[in-house]
Image (spheres, rainbow, N blue to C red):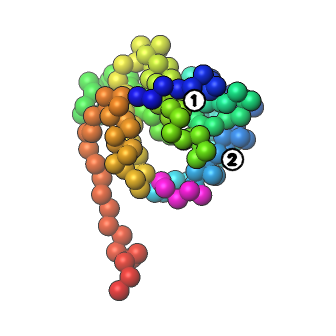
């Protein structure tokens, strides 16, 4: 796991951050790297505010990444029935800030936000078109592959 430079800080999101995070979502969608991604609006994000909505900021306070997770107890065969676990739904770092340990810092902060609330089971998923580097990234945190999904869209095949 890459060391995060001291010039970055991690904190919980507030209502005042939501328009900026919504703009980052739009940037993420425009990258076209995540299948089916739809940008959350500030209104959508308001419903997701909580202890597991974490921002990375640079020394000037500009948001350069975010992670959003939520607690679930929906049954998954890999965790005991009825036990809470934290689902990391979204992780994004701006293109100019990638490769500097910010994503690792966001994941570490998210895991810690769960541990602080006595949650010690975590899951995540990705629809990233470049899934192998994503899988390798999460394996640095000792996440294990549990399942995978494939799709075939014959309407997009030219003949």
Calculate the distance from the C-alpha at mark 2 to the C-alpha at mark 1: 16 Å
Quadrant in which residue 72 is drawn: top left
- Residue located at (32% from left, 62% from top): 151
- Residue located at (56% from left, 56% from top): 31
Q: Is residue 152 magenta?
A: no
Quadrant in which residue 137 is drawn: top left
Residue ID for mark 2:
23
Quadrant in which residue 54 is drawn: top right
Asked whether the viewer can see residue 69, the reply is no
Asked whether the viewer can see residue 8, the reply is yes
Query: Is residue 158 depicted above or below 101 in this figure?
Result: below
Residue ID for mark 1:
53
- Residue located at (37% from left, 50% from top): 131
Q: Which residue is more in the foreground, 15 or 129?
A: 129
For label 1, the SS is strand
The N terminus lies in which quarter of the figure?
Answer: top left
Image coords of residue 134 (percent x, y): 39, 44
Image coords of residue 126 (percent x, y): 41, 46
């Amino acid at each position: 796991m890459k060391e995060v430079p001291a010039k970055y800080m991690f904190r919980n999101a507030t209502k005042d951050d939501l328009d900026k995070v919504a703009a980052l979502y739009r940037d993420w969608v425009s990258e076209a790297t995540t299948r089916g991604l739809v940008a959350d609006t500030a209104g959508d994000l308001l419903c997701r505010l909580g202890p597991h909505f974490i921002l990375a900021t640079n020394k000037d306070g500009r948001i350069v990444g975010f992670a959003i997770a939520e607690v679930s107890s929906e049954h998954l065969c890999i965790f005991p029935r009825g036990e809470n676990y934290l689902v990391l739904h979204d992780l994004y770092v701006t293109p100019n800030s990638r490769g500097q340990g910010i994503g690792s810092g966001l994941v570490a902060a998210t895991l810690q936000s769960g541990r602080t609330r006595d949650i010690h089971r975590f899951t995540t998923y990705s629809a990233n078109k470049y899934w192998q580097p994503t899988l390798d990234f999460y394996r640095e945190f000792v996440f294990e592959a549990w399942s995978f999904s494939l799709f075939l869209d014959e309407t997009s095949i030219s003949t």
